[in-house]
Amino acid sequence: MTNRTQNAVITGVGMYVPETVLDNKYFEKIVDTTNEWILSRTGISERRIIENGTTSDLATGALRDLMASSGLQAEDIDVIIICTITPDMFFPATACIVQNNVGAKNAWGFDLSAACSGFLFGLETGSALIESGRYKKVVVIGADKMSSVIDYTDRNTCILFGDAASAVLLESTSDTNYGIQDSILHCDGSGKDALCMLGGGSKNPASYETIDKGYHFIYQDGKTVFKAAVNGMADVSYKIMQKHNLTGDDVAYLVPHQANLRIIDATAKKMNITRDKVMINIGKYGNTTAATIPLCLTEYYRDGKVKKGDKLILAAFGAGFTWGSMYIVWGID
Ligand code: COA
């Protein structure tokens, strides 16, 4: 399958979703929208938000769940990669806070910023660390507290996002039929203005003016992002399938980033993959940014729907623009 003698393989999963549910009826009360509009245009029924807590709390919850379900010991973790665009603070890295929370005293780690493609970029980075032979146990966590950057008076964005975290453990396998097989990843900064948060960074340091202008909230040109997302995700997913001579029949599941059910359907259609072979949980959680893909993997695995040897195509698109696709073979019994 590959020229490598070792592959990185996912050997454990974990997740954390906060308890508070905001359903579409809630948004009918705070902005000019309807349950019917949200459901038909996005596929979202409800999303979760963390009322008292941070992204590191979400990530710590997911890592603790991963540790409890896989038997992973804190002191055995070598690296913690937190994929997020809503870190607790600019610095220190959220990875340091999570490392301390779980007592991973032998780990180093860092945050990775690639928005909705964050988990794929993190999985690629973590895999390379494993394949290098220098690290044995790498944890990749997608975690975002999107409610911290949402303007709850903007109906264009507030209905879309939720808070969550999900984690995977990467280890090495000498059976290269399993694990991370290949990836096609891209970024294109010419899309930077279509989806961004303008304030707080070195371009527009926080000031009364940036607050007045709402620069600390997400800005999105929905139509532009929608088109770019459909084209970007479908293009790389199709290419990676072609490269590995995979047809829709060979693929057990497409695991797409969960931003909009119409984007997911359009991507699957272009790949000739039927709805029953697409992982979907956007209805329950909305767009949880870096957490969507591992959240899908965790839920489908725990529901017994993913089996060892299943061929999965992961696909994402997000701010940057960033996008990509990964071909993995599931390695947990
Ligand atoms: N309720 C009711 N109407 C709404 C609304 C809401 N929550 N949000 C937007 N609208 C309105 C708009 O104001 C617009 O009204 P107008 O024509 O009077 O200006 C109308 O609906 C149509 O807007 P449009 O942008 O064409 O809607 P859409 O069908 O494209 O859906 C999104 C909007 C945001 C759901 C969609 O563009 C999308 O999902 N974009 C990509 C999101 C994404 O992937 N983001 C994360 C990066 S991965």
Image (spheres, helix red, strand yellow):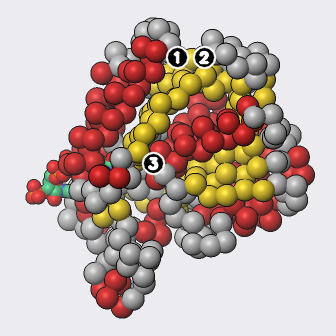
Q: Residue at x 67, y 58 (%)?
A: 110
Where residue 120 sits, quadrant-wise, is top right
Q: Earlier in the sequence, mark 3 or mark 2?
A: 3
Q: Secondary structure at mark 1?
A: loop
| Gap in angstroms between the C-alphas marked 1 and 3 | 23 Å
**Looking at the image, can residue 228 be seen?**
yes
- Who is closer to the viewer here, 113 or 63? 113
Disc assigned to residue 116:
3
Q: Residue at x 20, y 65 (%)?
A: 32
* Residue at numbered disc 2: 310
Question: Left or right: 182 with respect to 214?
Answer: right
Q: Residue at x 82, y 48 (%)?
A: 78
Is ligand 1 less than 8 Å from the beta carbon at label 3?
yes
* Residue at numbered disc 1: 252
Disc 3 marks a residue whose amino acid type is Cys
Q: Quadrant of the C terminus?
A: top right
Query: Where 141 falls versus 175 (above or below)?
Result: below
Q: Secondary structure at mark 3?
A: helix
Question: Left or right: 273 with respect to 41?
Answer: right
